Image (cartoon, rainbow, N blue to C red):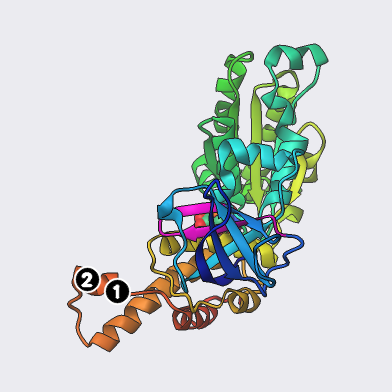
Amino acid sequence: MSKKFTVINSPLYYDEDITNYATVNATDIDLSETQYLEITTRHGEFKFEAVTDIGVPSNTIGLNSRQRTRDRLKLYHTYYVKPSVKQSSLHSIVDLFDQKYNFRAKVGGSDTVFEKIFGEALLARFYPKNFVQRTNMKHAKGILLYGVSGTGKTLIARTVSEILGVLPKVINGPEILSKMLGDSEAKIRQLFDEAKSDPNGDLHLLIFDEIDAVCKRRSVDEANVRDSVENSITSQLLCEMDGLHQLNNLLIIATTNRPSAIDPALLRPGRLEIHVKIELPNDEARLNIFDIYAKPLLQNNLLHHDVNFDRIIQETQGWTEAHIERLVRTANVCAMKRDLVARGTLKIDESAADALMVSDVDFIAAINVIRSISLSL
Ligand SMILES: Nc1ncnc2c1ncn2[C@@H]1O[C@H](COP(=O)(O)OP(=O)(O)OP(=O)(O)O)[C@@H](O)[C@H]1O
């Protein structure tokens, strides 16, 4: 959780190697748990070692920064920090992937989802091909991401494709249905042709967005044209996926808001076999996502120190990831509105704009705006 603190003594030259210490009040921070504080300053995000022993007054925390003077924290200035425990030498799979691909900077609060995706579906794809062949292992063929709208299913699917280094073919369920009227089986076949023609080649990735639009439970009422097209798309897809048995170079990621509408045959092992639910974000996840979108404001000194993170997190319970992203955008707009009205003019020059900070009142206003325009809240 992000916390606020105010620097009360800085710098404090501590020992001979002239490490740079600042002392900060730390009533909100569990000192026994905290070994590092990640602090966002104008110059970027820095990790400070937290020191609570000799020379540091009680109820305060010393921040050891071996960085240069520019990272020195200003006296009486309030900063936002994320306390973290010392990293052990053992990393989780998600930590290892994040170290290399830095996806947490873009997708917040999704560690458990990525744990399942990397741990259960993709890990073997990071081992050398020859090794995998010797184990006779077959890679997972398909992943279904399901959860309510706006929880980041598409974002996660695209992030996985970036991590795999593959340019995916993205198929939008509702769009493809209309394009496929009359020609559905051939169109589905085409999607798989490239991978089939290059069985020992690079990985191919198909992302099926809103797959429930085309692969509904098959209907017995073939008299209805739409039902009959959907039935034939589903059957063709099943057929192609069974053909993948021998192929190790194709992965399908499908997304849906309505998993129960999908034909169960598609969800069997060997097909879309790994099912990952994307939940609404909990408190910590909402804060992570908030941090991602508020970071440019923090870095450019545009976020007022009166912003009450704890209240924002409380008031946004039940919101989706997309709502949190919207909240930061809307707070920006509310700040501009407030500023324009106070100035009584639409003429805003650079220096006037630079003085504008997004403040707590703007987040309060933004929360109300979003509640008033979202049916689901
Ligand atoms: N975990 C996340 N971290 C940061 N931003 C997120 C996250 N999840 C969603 N978002 C934001 O919400 C937007 C909408 O997400 P996305 O389209 O991936 O949701 P979805 O679950 O696929 O929705 P739908 O079911 O309606 O297609 C994203 O573009 C992104 O801005």
- Quadrant of residue 332 within the rendered picture: bottom left
Q: Quadrant of the C terminus?
A: bottom right
Name the spot of residue 325 as percent of width and height, x first: 51, 64
Q: Secondary structure at mark 2?
A: helix
Residue 232 in sight from this viewpoint: no
For residue 218, above or below residue 258: above
Q: Which residues are magenta?
A: 34-47
Classify 10 Å Cα crowding around label 2: few (below 14), some (14-19), many (20 and above). few
Q: Which residue is tagged 1? A: 355
Instruction: Name the residue rendered at 52%, 52% in the picture.
Output: 46
Classify 10 Å Cα crowding around label 1: few (below 14), some (14-19), many (20 and above). few
- State the residue lying farthest toward the front: 16
Name the spot of residue 152 as percent of width and height, x first: 60, 54
Instruction: Name the residue rendered at 57%, 52% in the picture.
Output: 47
Proximity of marks 1 and 2: CB atoms separated by less than 8 Å: yes
Residue 243 in sight from this viewpoint: yes
- Quadrant of residue 193 within the rendered picture: top right
Instruction: Using the numbered discs, state the Cα–Cα distance from disc 1 to disc 2 in whole angstroms.
Output: 6 Å
Name the spot of residue 290 as percent of width and height, x first: 55, 64
Q: Which residue is tagged 2? A: 351
Amino acid, disc 1: Ala
Asked whether 60 or 214 is in front, the reply is 60
Please give the count of numbered marks on the rendered protein.
2
For residue 228, above or below residue 241: below
Amino acid, disc 2: Ser
Magenta stretch: dominant SS? strand
Marking on residue 85: none
Left or right position of 258 against 25:
right
